[in-house]
Amino acid sequence: MEDLDQLGLDLSAFANGLPGGFFAYEAHGTGRILFANDQMAHIFGCDNVDEFLELVGGTFMGLVYHEDRLRVQRSIWAQIDGESDDPAQRDHVTYRVVDKRGTLRYLDEYGRLVKDTASGDLFFVFVTDTLAVPNQIAQEREGALPTEILPSVDALTGLSSMYYYHTHVAQALSQASVQGIPMVDVFFDIDHFRTINFRLGYEGGDQILQRVAHILQECFPNELLARFSNDHFVLVTSREGVEERITRAHDLVARIVSGMTVELKAGIYELAPNELRIPFAHDRAKAACASIKGRYDQFFCFYDPNLAMREDMRTYIVDHIEQAVEEGWIRNYYQPVVRVSTRSCCSLEALSRWVDPNEGILPPARYVHVLEEARLVHLLDRAVVERACADITRTKQQLGTAVPVSLNFSPTALALMDIPALLEETVRRYNIDRRLLHVEITESSLTEDPELLRHVIRSLHKTGYEVWMDDFGSGYSSLNLLKDYDFDVLKVDMEFLRGMEGNERSKTIVHSITNLAHSLGMRTLVEGVETEGQLEFLREMGADMAQGFLISKPIPHDVLLSDFYPRHPPEGVI
């Protein structure tokens, strides 16, 4: 409450009079809860708000059932990414919680992001307890609650509401089981719906949802079909012919907007006879759907056990990133960079590894993308910066000098934290030279938010840090980007070196890029060097630096000191 009091907001005056739960929390990280009303405590079976906050650990993600956290975070951050100035725009999501008695129950949440407050970005949320329905209906008859709290129909699409779905799905499956009809749970998602909202506006997006709902009703008549949240729909239907009916729905949806494809995805879970684990089945269908998002060669997918393993790992990563940082599971490996002319070590690229006591060593591909989607990647990046500065200090103590370390930051991290401020705070704390840290920005980052990138690059240069462009040549606008941004080093994409010895065009491209960079006052670093022939060619072309498995794979700091530096003397900054 103290944080919200600073905003001049007196929420208690009306929040405790609401018919449902109401709370406010910080938009970033795990979401510290700043306010909750009495009804929120009652939903969780707690006597008061303090007991509720203790039960959920004082954070929004502590409130959400662990298997639903990744999905809920995606939904919330989709709203943040597509935030408009329309005050009527809301986020609606359904998820599970565990109350004080250990009962698993569903909540319907309607949230609104409020930006630029004195306490930072906040979410204000109204909650209805969808699994407390039978008792609430009984109280309604006694005049205690208004009936509109628990609608049976989704107001936008006219489909069944999630309340209706949850209270009728067991009956539908029971009848099918008696008749011996195999059933499936289907989860539908409109791919890239945020882009549709951007192009057509929110009113246009709502019209698309209404037309999709109509098509689904047409293709699955008299079935238990509901709008789950936002652009998601759920269905239980007969297994027989489900692929053909989904295909028909997909093809009809694809044609509803002239000049723009609307892509409907479906995940399918085959229900066992007398299936009672409805949330379990629904999660599996959703996982199958998520596995084909962004793919244009597949629009439906049946669940298989491998998907469960991947989804379980995603959940594990989101749930344990803070513990991994605190307990030192996040460690740095370093891939050396050498001067082409001398093979002396002139730089290191910091690459994280998650050394888990239960799962072993996890490569970045297993967790970086997950953390980016969950908007928690800044926790990882902070840990990498901290470890890099600690290792630089250790190297200086042992060798009297240290090699600069380059740090990779994703587009998500650039939006979530002030990178120049983070570097300044850390180098001052470790008392190291700014020249010992370089910042790598991927080419794809430059198209996400150009103004933000320009500001970050200017700030980094102003405070004395080099900025490197990573993966140059991997996109289609590389030369344009060189015109608009100021870089110190170009890292040439490794694909240019594939088969270079026998490809004159590849050689010409590398030669031209090297000359272009030098004429613009930049140095070049070619990554992916795997043969002596490639390294020799780079020497002939005047390339400055090289990196790749010919030189070294990523190695721990101890191996760097004991094995690599004796063979490749470091060009350090004293």
Image (tube, grey):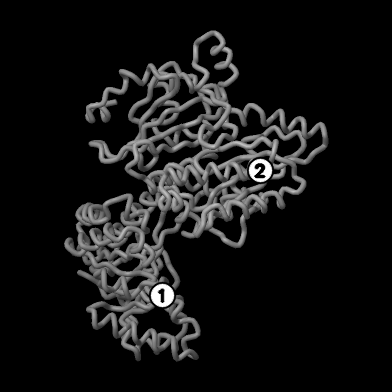
Location of residue 46 with respect to 364 vertically, above or below: above
Counting other residues with Cα less than 10 Å from the Cα at mark 1, is it few (<14), some (14-19), or many (20 or more)? Answer: some
Q: Amino acid at mark 1?
A: Asp
Expressed as whole percent of the image width and height from the top left, the position of residue 448 reads 36, 59
Say what secondary structure mark 1 lies in: loop
Front residue of this view, candidates 4 and 547: 4
Kind of residue indicated by mark 2: Glu
Residue 9 horizontal side relative to residue 25, left or right:
left
Q: Of all residues shown, which one is farthest toward the front? A: 258
* Badge 1 vs badge 2, beta-carbon distance below 8 Å: no
Residue 305 visible from this viewpoint: no
Front residue of this view, candidates 164 and 393 = 164
Q: Where does residue 526 sit, x and y in percent of width and height?
A: 37, 78
Question: Where, by quadrant of the figure, is residue 167 drawn?
Answer: top right
Q: Residues within 10 Å of mark 2 (few under 14, many from 20)?
A: few
Q: Quadrant of the N terminus?
A: top left
- Sequence-first disc among 1 and 2: 2
| Alpha carbons under labels 1 and 2: distance apart | 49 Å
Residue 147: which numbered mark, if any? none
Residue mark closest to the camera, 1 vs 2: 2
Looking at the image, the residue that sits furthest to the top is 142
At a point 50% along the width and 30% down the height, the residue shown is 108
Residue 534 image offset from top left, x and y in percent: 43, 86
Q: Is residue 310 above or below residue 237?
A: below
Question: Residue 493: which disc?
Answer: 1
Q: Position of residue 116 (x, y in %)?
A: 26, 40
Query: Measuring 46% from the left and 51% from the top, which residue is drawn there?
Result: 196
User: Could one spot residue 335 in this view of the protein?
Assistant: yes
Which is more toward the observer, 278 or 80?
A: 80
SS type, badge 2: helix
Number of numbered markers:
2
Disc on res. 218: 2
